[in-house]
Amino acid sequence: MILIADSGSTKTNWIFLDAEGHKVKTQTTIGLNPYFVSEHQIQEVASCVVANQVNDVNRVMFYGAGCGKIKKASIIQNVLETVFPNAFDIQVEGDILGGARSTLQNAPGISCIIGTGANSCVYDGEKIINNVPSLGYLLADYGSGAVMGKDVLSMVLQRKLPVDITKEFYDFYQLDDREILDSLYNLPFVNRFLASFVPFLLQYSEVEEFAQVISQNFRKFFEYFVLPYFPENENLPITIVGSVAFHFKSFIVEEAARLHIEINQIVKNPMEGLIQYHTGVKV
């Protein structure tokens, strides 16, 4: 049996496949980004997911946010080797390689992620050959759920929105300023908290202030995550994976067009493409 996991900062999708590539079991858990989740928590989640499946799994492919660096990937690797003692092949890779394999398969291209976080790379059909530094929501991640959520909160707390929109925000989330600041500065998983405000941004995207947040974020996304690969790679197809990209697809395509960039594909999550990549079965 094969286990494929796609882990972002917010959630992890797990899917067990038989030898023919057919789905046996699926499960969703919290995101297991090793920058934000402890090894003990990762162990607990993984053990819960694999209940009654341990002896049947012989291959594990884990693609995760925060796993692009060997030191962090080794945390996930150690847990999976403990949880799946009979598996002969366990691989842990960054989510950006997962996105590239999913959308591009064995063809070269520029693969991007816009979810809770953001990232990009140049993929040669086998491996990543170039990528800009992934700096997280404090220093980059433009267009991501965390950064756009932060921008929404900033405008709300600074009273830069129309009064009726501000009231709608507080009514919708049932939070006061003290609770918001406490979550920002004293509680864990700030990136997830920030991303939770993206649905409100999408719902009121026609509001002028929010429209500017959206367009400015995606322009910065392309300027930071895509344009540095040009002109050498400007003829390569560009694909984007992620829930934020999926829901803001029209805004992304519009901003890309302004920069004379063509987007070839936007998908919500990479799992179907990963199944095809690892089993040859097109879902």
Image (cartoon, rainbow, N blue to C red):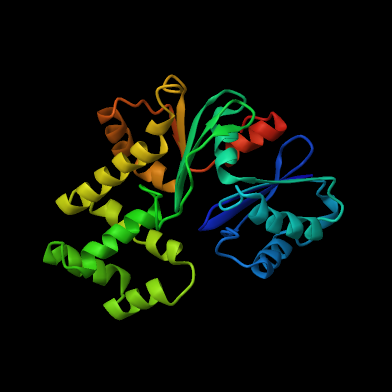
Which quarter of the picture shows residue 265? top left
Q: The N terminus is located in which quarter?
A: top right
- 221 or 7: which is nearer to us? 221
Residue closest to the eye, 178 or 22: 178
**Observer able to see residue 176:** no
Quarter of the figure with residue 124: top right
Residue 62 position, x and y percent, is: 67, 48
Q: Is residue 165 above or below residue 241?
A: below
Residue 146, above or below 166: above
**Residue 16 as seen in the image, left or right of residue 198:** right
Residue extending furthest toward the top: 235
Q: Residue at x 79, y 37 (%)?
A: 19
User: Which residue does the image show at 66% across and 55% down from the upper left?
Assistant: 71
Q: Quadrant of residue 197?
A: bottom left
Which quadrant holds the C terminus? top right
- Give the image location of residue 263, x and y in percent: 39, 28
Q: Residue at x 46, y 32 (%)?
A: 239
Q: Residue furthest left?
A: 163
Task: Establish if 79 lies above or below 98.
Answer: below
Q: Is residue 265 left or right of residue 153?
A: right
Horizontal arrangement in the rendering, residue 245 relative to residue 86 (left or right): left
| Residue 149 drawn at (x, y percent) | 33, 58
The residue closer to the viewer here, 79 or 165, is: 79
